[in-house]
Image: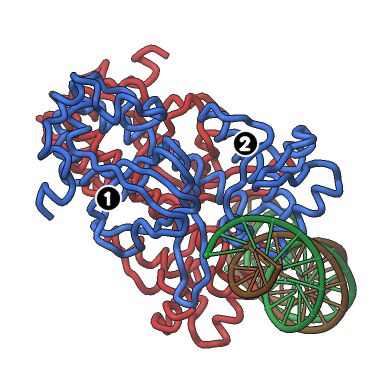
Chain colours: A red, B blue, C brown, D green
DNA sequence: CGCCCTCTTGAAATTGTTCAATAGAGGTGG
DNA sequence: CCACCTCTATTGAACAATTTCAAGAGGGCG
């Protein structure tokens, strides 16, 4: 719980100095424009960076579990993560997938309300919550940014409730593929052969379906000619308008 | 779009003066401790109040529609509202019910992402978004409060996704009744004979069920002896532990 | 008091699940 | 580099939960 646990690097060289010398990992951050760091000038950036510890996760490695003390918040810099909740009997609901640029750990309570786990090998920036909150007092831009992020997540959550409560399996899969495509595009990646790095089980747990239904629905869309299943977890959206028609406006 | 549209009252008497003379509606606000106003001192409160217009809605009256320009935010002071999204063919997902003390209108985009409508006759405090945001610059406590509210809503949204994606009809209804009970208690109302002011259709649209399934499930729980259906939209939670067992930890 | 709207109940239909088996892909070690 | 092994994905058939369609009962408001 001391500063040293979280900030090993700053003992070696003050972050401000490192930033000046362009040794800062943040200076090279490819997703800076999407993160909490986006609105900061270089001085504020250095203060944030001083709190940061880089984290690397292997595929399948847990980041934290629901109910655990919520000591840190994170920014995803590479890879894909999933966030989920469990029922006592093991039924799982994946409440979101996280990609580079996404923020993780917003919770005004003392414990995480969900578990987080790497889907693919992933990199994150870790910030101790307490220190970041202290910094927010001095740099209100950070708080504003977090409020913006939270608002966007809320909009996405409502969209997901509509999907879970009212869409059919086919509509769910179509919406899911379009969501992946749009988010890839937002990060500057290709929108069309879209990368689908998560398992059928994860997709099912995200959409409120079984893996079998996910698989069958992919097959159906493939036979429709709406999509093509390519090697390496890629999906070609052969007829995007058809997908959008099916998805019902997402 | 002028100040006068939103703030008719301040033309009559400055809010600060009114607050001093205890004519302020906020001074008598019974849900102040739950709203964005909670952390404010009387001077800040007066500034907020100067932006406020009271709104009254009849049962069934719309407050705003999805896609509409998001000009205002609201605090509920009395009654019950619902918030929902529609699919092109009319399928509806109620994404939340709002009770006194609840905040409404958080959206970082230019338009509302959902529609809002009164379930029972309701009262709200309306604030023009632009002016409240300007005030937030000077009173960061408001922004902090909003971030706290947004975080809580995000936690609730994830809980609801778990419900929609993974719970059975019986589990959904049990969770719903317990949620209503807990929220009534938070507002200082009775936790046990719980008021259920919304229609079976609204409940179904909230839980991802049809009205028939909602009705059948109520009947089933009634025959179990788990609940009793009382007159005036009240439900007695005869065996709360059984409900909690069924709900699976909400 | 009666009308209308909501709620309840029943039976049939359907979507998605469950159970079960096969096929495929990725990774490891010989 | 290939063979094997394991985990994931696909496919099939029977089953179940919830929906759909249909009719009747109840309750509140004019």
Residue designated by label 1: B108
Residue at 39% x, 82% y: name it. A241
Mark 2 closeness class: few <14, some 14–19, many ≥20 residues within 10 Å: many
Between B109 and A211, the one nearer to me in the picture: B109
The chain identifier of the residue carrying mark 2 reads B
Can residue A205 be seen? no
- SS at badge 2: helix
Judged left or right of residue A190, residue B128 is: left
Q: Nearer the viewer, mark 1 or mark 2?
A: 2
The numbered mark, 1 or 2, whose residue comes first in the sequence reads 1
Which quadrant holds residue A74? top left
Left or right side of A213 for D1: left
Quadrant location of residue B143? top left
Task: Report if residue B143 is visible in the image.
Answer: yes
Residue B118, x across and y down, in percent: 44, 53
In x, y percent, where is residue B131?
Answer: 16, 42
Secondary structure beneath label 1? loop
User: In this view, which residue lies farthest toward the top?
Assistant: A2
Instruction: Point out the image quarter for the N terminus of chain A.
Output: top left
Residue in the image at 21% along x and 46% along y: B129
Instruction: Please tell me whether residue B23 is drawn above or below residue C29 in the rendered image.
Output: above
Decide: marks 1, 2 in contact (CB < 8 A)? no
The answer to which of A249 and B69 lies nearer the viewer is B69
At 23% from the left edge and 34% from the top edge, which residue is drawn?
A: A142
Quadrant of the rendered structure where residue D14 is? bottom right
Dividing the image into 4 quarters, which one contains the C terminus of chain A?
bottom left
Label 1 resides on the chain identified as: B
Question: What residue is shown with label 2?
Answer: B181
- The percent position of residue C19, horizontal first and vertical second, equals 86, 63
Residue found at x 48% / y 64%: A196
- Residue A134 position (above or below residue C15): above
């Amino acid at each position: 719980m001391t500063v040293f646990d979280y900030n090993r690097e700053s003992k070696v060289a003050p972050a401000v100095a490192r930033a000046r010398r362009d040794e800062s990992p943040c200076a090279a951050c490819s997703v800076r424009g999407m993160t909490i760091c986006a609105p900061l000038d270089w001085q504020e950036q250095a203060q944030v960076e001083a709190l940061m510890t880089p984290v690397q996760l292997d595929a399948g490695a847990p980041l934290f579990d629901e109910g655990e003390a919520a000591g840190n918040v994170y920014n995803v810099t590479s890879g894909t993560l999933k966030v989920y909740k469990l029922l006592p009997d093991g039924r799982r609901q994946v409440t979101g997938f996280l990609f580079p640029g996404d923020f993780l750990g917003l919770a005004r309570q003392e414990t995480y309300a969900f578990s987080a786990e790497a889907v693919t090998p992933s990199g994150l920036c870790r910030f101790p919550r307490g220190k970041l909150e202290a910094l927010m007092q001095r740099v209100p831009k950070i708080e504003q940014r977090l409020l913006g992020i939270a608002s966007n997540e809320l909009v996405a959550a409502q969209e997901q409730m509509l999907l879970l409560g009212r869409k059919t399996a086919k509509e769910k899969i179509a919406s899911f593929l379009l969501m992946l495509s749009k988010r890839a595009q937002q990060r500057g990646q290709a929108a069309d052969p879209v990368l689908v790095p998560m398992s059928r089980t994860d997709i099912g747990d995200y959409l409120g379906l079984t893996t079998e239904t996910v698989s069958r629905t992919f097959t159906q869309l493939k036979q429709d000619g709406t999509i093509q299943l390519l090697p390496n977890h890629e999906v070609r959206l052969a007829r995007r308008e058809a997908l959008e028609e099916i998805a019902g406006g997402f």
